[in-house]
Amino acid sequence: MRIRISEIFTSIEGEGIYIGTKTLFVRLAGCPLRCFYCDTPYALSISNGKDYSIEDVLHMIKATLNNSRNVFKVNFTGGEPLLQHLALYRLAELIKSEMGLRTYLESSCFDAERFAYLLPLIDICKVEFKLRDANAVADSNHYTILLNNALKCLKYAIDNSKVTYIKVVASKLSKREELEELAEMIFGSMKVKKEDIRGFVLQPAHGINEPSLEHMLSLYDAVYPYYEDVRVIPQLHKVMGIP
């Protein structure tokens, strides 16, 4: 079995509930979405990744950790990890059995069945919801499919007692009403409870269509009535100027 990898490196977690912690990143190549705020365009095409055997990637991870200790988790990011779910399953299986590290999946959740397939070998799940202004997909029909898959992924992660949090990237084009509708779907229709998730992160877009403080406060207020622990967290690695 082969896998296409963009890069493997150790850095500081720049997003989400583990922000500021030391992490080993395995960036897989290829993503079917085209969000305007993507900060890794070099990983969008699967052809840009290098082809490795699973065993070779495991050796690379071990070598990286030998030079960088005190890491408790491996972050599978992209690109989009679900694009190579079969190979990633095997890699995660070996990492857990041979290294005992926690596995962390950062995904756009575009395919709930692939997500469910990987879930037994994943400890930490970031479930990302794209707003319409992300322009992640071609049209409204595809957006509805993307949204429904993300909702299913959230349910799968919660039902399987994973460490789960929600992330939404917000820009100056993001609509408060849309975020309110999303919060109602999650905490109203789906009946997700506060204790089911570890956080709801609003991440300001960086570089393009950056939102103002006033706009972020308005979006915060859209989520707060449903989930009081909502947080606005910018990308730390952008501030630090690191990968």
Image: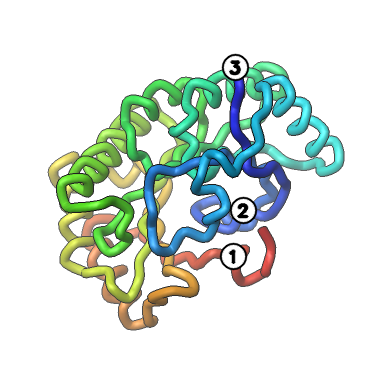
Task: Tell me the residue at 57%/53% (across/down).
Answer: 42
In the displayed structure image, the side of residue 59 where residue 86 appears, left or right: left
Q: Residues within 10 Å of mark 3 (few under 14, many from 20)?
A: few
Locate the C terminus by quadrant. bottom right
In whole angstroms, how far apart are the C-alphas of marks 2 and 3?
29 Å
Q: Look at the numbered disc 1 and give the secondary structure of its residue.
A: helix
The answer to whether mark 2 and mark 3 are in CB contact below 8 A is no
Labels 3 and 1: the sequence-earlier one? 3
Locate the N terminus by quadrant. top right
- Place residue 47 in its image quadrant: top right
| Relative image position of residue 181 (x, y in whole percent) | 16, 57
Q: Nearer the viewer, mark 2 or mark 3?
A: 3
Q: Look at the numbered disc 2 and give the secondary structure of its residue.
A: loop
Q: Which residue is mark 3?
A: 1
In whole angstroms, how far apart are the C-alphas of marks 2 and 1?
8 Å
Number of the label disc, if any, that sits on residue 157? none
Q: Which residue is mark 2?
A: 13
- Relative to 215, is 51 above or below? above
Q: Amino acid at mark 2?
A: Glu
Task: Tell me the residue at 35%/66% (across/down).
Answer: 170
In the displayed structure image, the side of residue 22 where residue 110 appears, left or right: left
Q: Residues within 10 Å of mark 2 (few under 14, many from 20)?
A: many
Q: Which residue is mark 1?
A: 236
Q: Amino acid at mark 1?
A: Leu
Labels 2 and 3: the sequence-earlier one? 3
